[in-house]
Image (tube, helix red, strand yellow):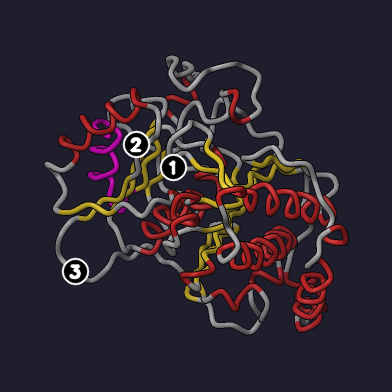
């Protein structure tokens, strides 16, 4: 039985991904100048599809998990499928997929959930790719314990899912294990899954993935760091979606990934998947201490990063699962804005110091 149908958190994430994937595909052929805007006047794009998908997903997750909190990148208001022209068709897909699952077996396989959770949703990660018809875009969601400390962003993560419809791929993780599968796994509980075990691609060479921010100050920092980073790597990949880059690191397709300035919604799903796949993981230290995450202190894009607590500064690979790797001890204090995933401790600590 597909784990996506057995676990209550993954099952809710699965339904959200079904809605998001279908709407992304529908919107891909319907985008126009009137449905595309920019957050910075240049290339930090946002579309009507982002807001619509987030609104539909928000409603579905709150319907399934009314005790939880759902935070979306775009701040959209919840919208029921019943209020959408394609809502009936989507409800039918969700109903039929749920009906194919073995409900008694699923219920017996999952322990009772305790506590409440916070869901961090990116309706479309890789919006520039989405607008330009490049396949590397996805829906991403990560689930964290509601009681987790905001100053310790590596702690408290319990589930993650990333779905890339045009790549025909879904990645997900729960309780220390991670898997990948074709997109059919979202609706067919008998779709084969591949467990991610931490093995890297059977090849020589060292490949690092990264991304670049839109603010000029951050871009300047990233370009300077890139020269140092490439002294220890043979090649670089730039997909344009942090969530997909993180999943590529989880699968071992790249040896490492690093980037400054990610929002929590960018890494929420993918970093947990990489962690559960056995990668060394460090999430941005001020991830929950910024105004763009709905936190309580105001830090603008061009102002200095918030100073993390000692716990956040020393936090690295998450403590949420038995499979989590140990914290780094030899690396210099990383930049508060830095997120790093790597397949070896040596590369991990190098990127913490130089990324």
* SS type, badge 3: loop
Q: Describe residue 340's horizontal placement relative to residue 283 as left or right.
A: left
Which residue in the structure is indicated by mark 1? 317
Which residue in the structure is indicated by mark 2? 328
Question: In terms of depth relative to the viewer, which is nearer, 223 or 172?
Answer: 223
* SS type, badge 1: loop
Residue 20 covered by magenta stretch: no
**Which residues fall within the magenta stretch?**
342-355
Q: Describe residue 210's horizontal placement relative to residue 14 as left or right.
A: left
Q: Is residue 274 visible?
A: yes
Query: Mark 2 touching mark 3, by CB under 8 A?
Result: no
Query: Mark 1 touching mark 2, by CB under 8 A?
Result: yes
Can you say which quadrant of the picture contains the C terminus? top left
- Frontmost of labels 2 and 3 is 3
Q: Quadrant of residue 144?
A: top right
Earlier-in-chain disc, 1 versus 2: 1
Question: In terms of depth relative to the viewer, which is nearer, 58 or 89?
Answer: 89
The residue at 86%/57% (across/down) is 83
Mark 2 surroundings: few (<14), some (14-19) or many (≥20) residues within 10 A = some
Image coords of residue 328 (percent x, y): 34, 36
The residue at 43%/32% (across/down) is 261
Secondary structure predominantly adopted by residues drawn in magenta: helix
The residue at 44%/42% (across/down) is 317
Which residue in the structure is indicated by mark 3? 203
Taking 17 as reference, is 314 above or below it? Answer: above
Image coords of residue 201 (percent x, y): 27, 68
Q: CA distance from mark 1 to mark 3?
A: 25 Å
Can you say which quadrant of the picture contains the N terminus? bottom right
* SS type, badge 2: loop
Q: Quadrant of residue 260?
A: top left
């Amino acid at each position: 039985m597909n784990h996506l149908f057995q676990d209550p958190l993954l099952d809710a994430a699965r339904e959200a991904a079904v809605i998001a994937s279908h709407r992304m595909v529908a919107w891909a052929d319907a985008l126009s100048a009137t449905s595309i805007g920019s957050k910075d006047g240049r290339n930090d794009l946002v579309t009507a599809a982002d807001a619509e998908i987030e609104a539909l997903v928000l409603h579905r997750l709150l319907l399934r998990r009314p005790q939880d909190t759902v935070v979306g990148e775009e701040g959209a208001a919840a919208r029921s499928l019943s209020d959408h022209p394609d809502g009936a068709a989507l409800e039918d897909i969700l109903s039929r997929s749920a009906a194919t699952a073995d409900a008694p077996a699923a219920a017996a396989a999952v322990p009772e959930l305790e506590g409440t959770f916070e869901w961090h949703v990116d309706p479309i990660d890789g919006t520039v790719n989405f607008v330009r018809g490049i396949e590397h875009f996805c829906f991403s969601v990560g689930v964290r314990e509601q009681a987790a400390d905001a100053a310790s962003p590596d702690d408290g993560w319990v589930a993650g899912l990333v779905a890339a419809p045009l790549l025909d791929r879904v990645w997900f993780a729960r309780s220390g294990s991670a898997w990948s599968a074709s997109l059919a796994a979202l609706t067919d509980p008998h779709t084969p899954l591949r467990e991610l075990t931490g093995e890297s691609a059977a090849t020589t060479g060292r490949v690092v993935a990264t991304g670049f921010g839109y603010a000029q100050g951050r871009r300047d920092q990233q370009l300077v760091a890139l020269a140092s980073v490439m002294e220890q790597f043979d090649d670089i990949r730039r997909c344009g979606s942090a969530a997909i880059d993180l999943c590529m690191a989880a699968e071992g397709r790249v040896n490492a990934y690093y980037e400054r300035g990610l929002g929590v919604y960018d890494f929420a799903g993918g970093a947990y998947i990489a962690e559960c796949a056995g990668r060394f993981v460090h999430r941005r230290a001020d991830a929950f201490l910024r105004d763009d995450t709905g936190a309580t202190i105001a830090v603008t894009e061009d102002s200095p990063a918030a100073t993390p607590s000692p716990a956040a500064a020393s936090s690295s690979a998450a403590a949420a699962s038995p499979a989590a790797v140990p914290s780094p001890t030899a690396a210099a204090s990383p930049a508060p804005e830095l997120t790093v995933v790597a397949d070896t401790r040596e590369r991990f600590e190098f990127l913490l110091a130089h990324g």
